[in-house]
Image (cartoon, rainbow, N blue to C red):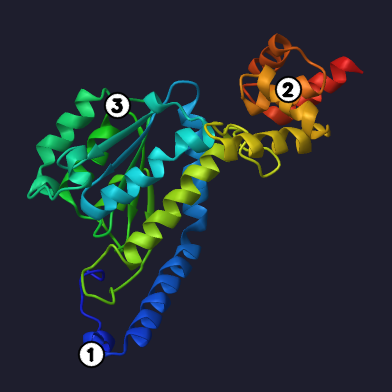
Amino acid sequence: MNTEIIDPRYIDLASWPTEIAVEAMLEGQLAAVAAIKAQIPAIANAADAAAVRLGETGRLVYVGAGTSGRVAVQDGVELYPTYSWPRERVLFLMAGGLAALTESAEGAEDDEAAARHAVAEARIGAPDVVIGVAASGRTPYTVAAIVAARAAGALTVGLANNPDSPLAGAAEHGITVRTGAEIVAGSTRMKAGTAQKAVLNMLSTATMLRLGRVHRGLMVNMRVSNEKLLHRGREMVRDIAGVDMAAAADALDAAGREIKPAVLIALGATAAQARQALAQVGGDLSRAITAWRAADA
């Protein structure tokens, strides 16, 4: 496997001056990110399909083992604070369970039966989108979970760092980012992990774009959970609605600190009217603003 081979350029890495070693690591990281470019169409296609499949009830399910599983969890846990994606609509199938996030789970990544059981126990089906991540593309737990999820009718995405992998082949949408040999041979938390993190960021963000959770480049579904985010939320309402900061603050308070209805309230709607207008267009703020202004004209 390309991610496991020894790159002869780095045989003497441990004896290099630290600054030179770090520079080499950076070059590797940049090369890993650059390798994603060839997979842009695959990432976009997967995101478009995911947005359609998720609808009103579907779940995003992340599957992985070891480093790849931890990278996957990192992406998924950010969806609630960033986009108010419901916590109950994100699921993590980690080889060895969530305890493996901080502790080694020896042998868990080879347990295909556990993967099939996890898919069945979670009742994964047609509305769900299941994303499997493995640098090798061969991790038995992850491949088995993707095979089982696809058989159950879920939309499946396989992200790997080696070509012609079973994982990418088993998934409906295969994404293969060829990051090659690691500077420290086999340490896939480096180049492969960086590329995985970037791809998952792009995939989940593009999905949220298609689901109407971004407006004019702003996180309009963001959870306002602290003073910093409260100020940011007020600025969003101010900028989108074209009102002053005081009016934006009042609107955000009236909306229970939810940005989308706050924008419509700032434009003259009541809280009930704002929520109804959003419900009628599936939460799409652009369409809700257009409809409100047309009705108010």
Where does residue 152 sit, x and y in percent of width and height? 28, 28
Asked if the residue under mark 3 is in contact with the one under mark 1, i.e. CB atoms within 8 Å, the reply is no
Q: Is residue 264 left or right of residue 54?
A: right
Q: Which residue is mark 1?
A: 15
Percent position of residue 41, x then y: 52, 54
Work out which quarter of the rendered image holds the N terminus and state it. Answer: bottom left
The Cα–Cα distance between marks 3 and 2, rounded to whole angstroms, is 40 Å
Mark 2 or mark 1, earlier in chain: 1
- Pointer 2 with pointer 1, Cβ within 8 A: no
CA gap, disc 1 and disc 3: 50 Å
For the residue marked with disc 2, what is the amino acid? Ala
Instruction: Name the spot of residue 105 as percent of width and height, x first.
Output: 11, 47
On the image, the x and y values in percent for residue 63 come to: 28, 42
Nearer to the camera, 258 or 146: 258
Q: Which mark lies nearer to you, 3 or 2?
A: 2
Q: What residue sits right under mark 2 in the picture?
A: 251
> Which residue has dot 3 on it?
124
Position of 13 with respect to 198 (left or right) is left
Type of the residue with mark 3: Ile
Q: Secondary structure at mark 2?
A: helix
Work out whether mark 3 precedes mark 2 in sequence or the reverse, and give the earlier one: 3
Regarding mark 3 in the picture, which secondary structure is present there?
Answer: loop
Q: Dot 3: within a 10 Å radius of its alpha carbon, few (fewer than 14), some, or many (20 or more) residues?
A: many
Disc 2 residue crowd, few under 14, some 14–19, many 20+, Cα 10 Å? many
Instruction: Identify the residue at image location x=75%, y=20%.
Output: 265
Amino acid at the residue labelled 1: Ser
| As drawn, 91 above or below 137 | above
- How many angstroms separate mark 2 from mark 1 (CA)? 61 Å
